[in-house]
Image (cartoon, rainbow, N blue to C red):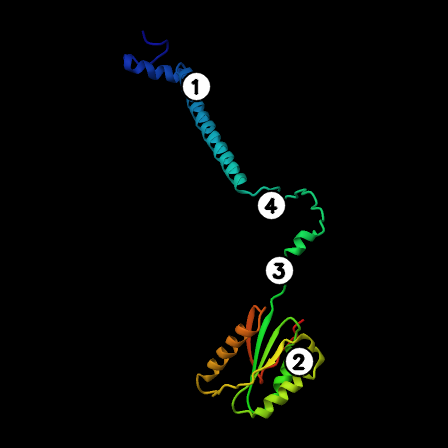
Amino acid sequence: APPTGCPFRHRSDYRRCAVTRGEMQPQHALSINLTSTKEGKRLLCLLSASLASLLLFILSFSCRLPSPLSSRPRLQSNPPIPFREPSSASASTTPPPPSLAYFISGSNGDGDRVLRLLHAVYHPKNRYLLHLDSSASQDQRERLALAVQSVPVFKAAGNVDVMGKPDTVNPRGSTVVSATLHGAAIMLRYLEEWDWFINLSASDYPLITQD
């Protein structure tokens, strides 16, 4: 039956009367509530996702920061090392200083410079062989030998010798090397107890002393 006071006679028009009179208002309110509930759920999901993303970002950023404690150097309490005096056994095993063999050569008129160089590099524990080549006279070699014997230190140590038979030396040829090898052979044969061989000429002069 049509609603009371409905001007429409067909069933299809009954709904229009119900809407007009407010009978459909509860259904309309229910649809509004359902719509608001769905939107609230969407907002809640969106808010939860945003909070989760923010939390993950904060955690990842905090992991990248260096720890203030790790940058500080660690202090280790090592026990002090006691001082020990060197024993006599360890001191006795220390090798003695090496002995040097000097071959000092010169030419004509270099006797004084050879003697000056000898005074500069002299040490009692070393060995010395003086050589004036064939361009110098025999008188120069004899005077050099007498000058060596006149020094008390040289005479007491007995470690300075003068070659009596000279070698021919040409600065432009290989005779310089030959004379040096000859001097080294003489020192190996007649002079003992030396470790290193040093070749010097009258034009050389040391910057520091043997000591």
Marked residue nearer the N-terminal end (2 or 3): 3
Residue in front for this viewpoint, 76 or 181 = 181
Give me the residue at 67% from left, 83% from top.
149
Query: Which residue type does callout 1 highlight?
Result: Ala
Q: Which residue is mark 2?
A: 119
| Residue 28 in picture, x, y percent from top left | 40, 19
Query: Which residue type does callout 4 highlight?
Result: Ser
SS state under label 3 = loop
Q: Distance of mark 4 from mark 3, alpha carbons?
A: 48 Å
Q: Which residue is mark 1?
A: 29
Q: Which residue is mark 4?
A: 71
Look at the image and tell me in which quarter the C terminus lies. Answer: bottom right
Marked residue nearer the N-terminal end (3 or 1): 1
Q: Distance of mark 1 from mark 2, alpha carbons?
A: 126 Å
- In the image, residue 42 sits, relative to residue 17, either above or below, namely below
SS state under label 1 = helix
Marked residue nearer the N-terminal end (1 or 2): 1
Q: Give neighbour class at mark 4: few <14, some 14-19, many 20+ (Cα, 10 Å).
A: few
Q: Give neighbour class at mark 2: few <14, some 14-19, many 20+ (Cα, 10 Å).
A: some
Query: Which residue type does callout 3 highlight?
Result: Pro
| Residue 201 in picture, x, y percent from top left | 56, 83
Q: Distance of mark 4 from mark 2, alpha carbons?
A: 62 Å
| Residue 122 in picture, x, y percent from top left | 65, 76
Within the image, what quadrant is residue 112 found in? Answer: bottom right
Give me the residue at 63% from left, 58% from top.
94
Dots 4 and 1: beta carbons under 8 Å?
Answer: no
SS state under label 2 = helix
Marked residue nearer the N-terminal end (4 or 1): 1
- Judge depth for marks 4 and 2 and give the one in front: 2
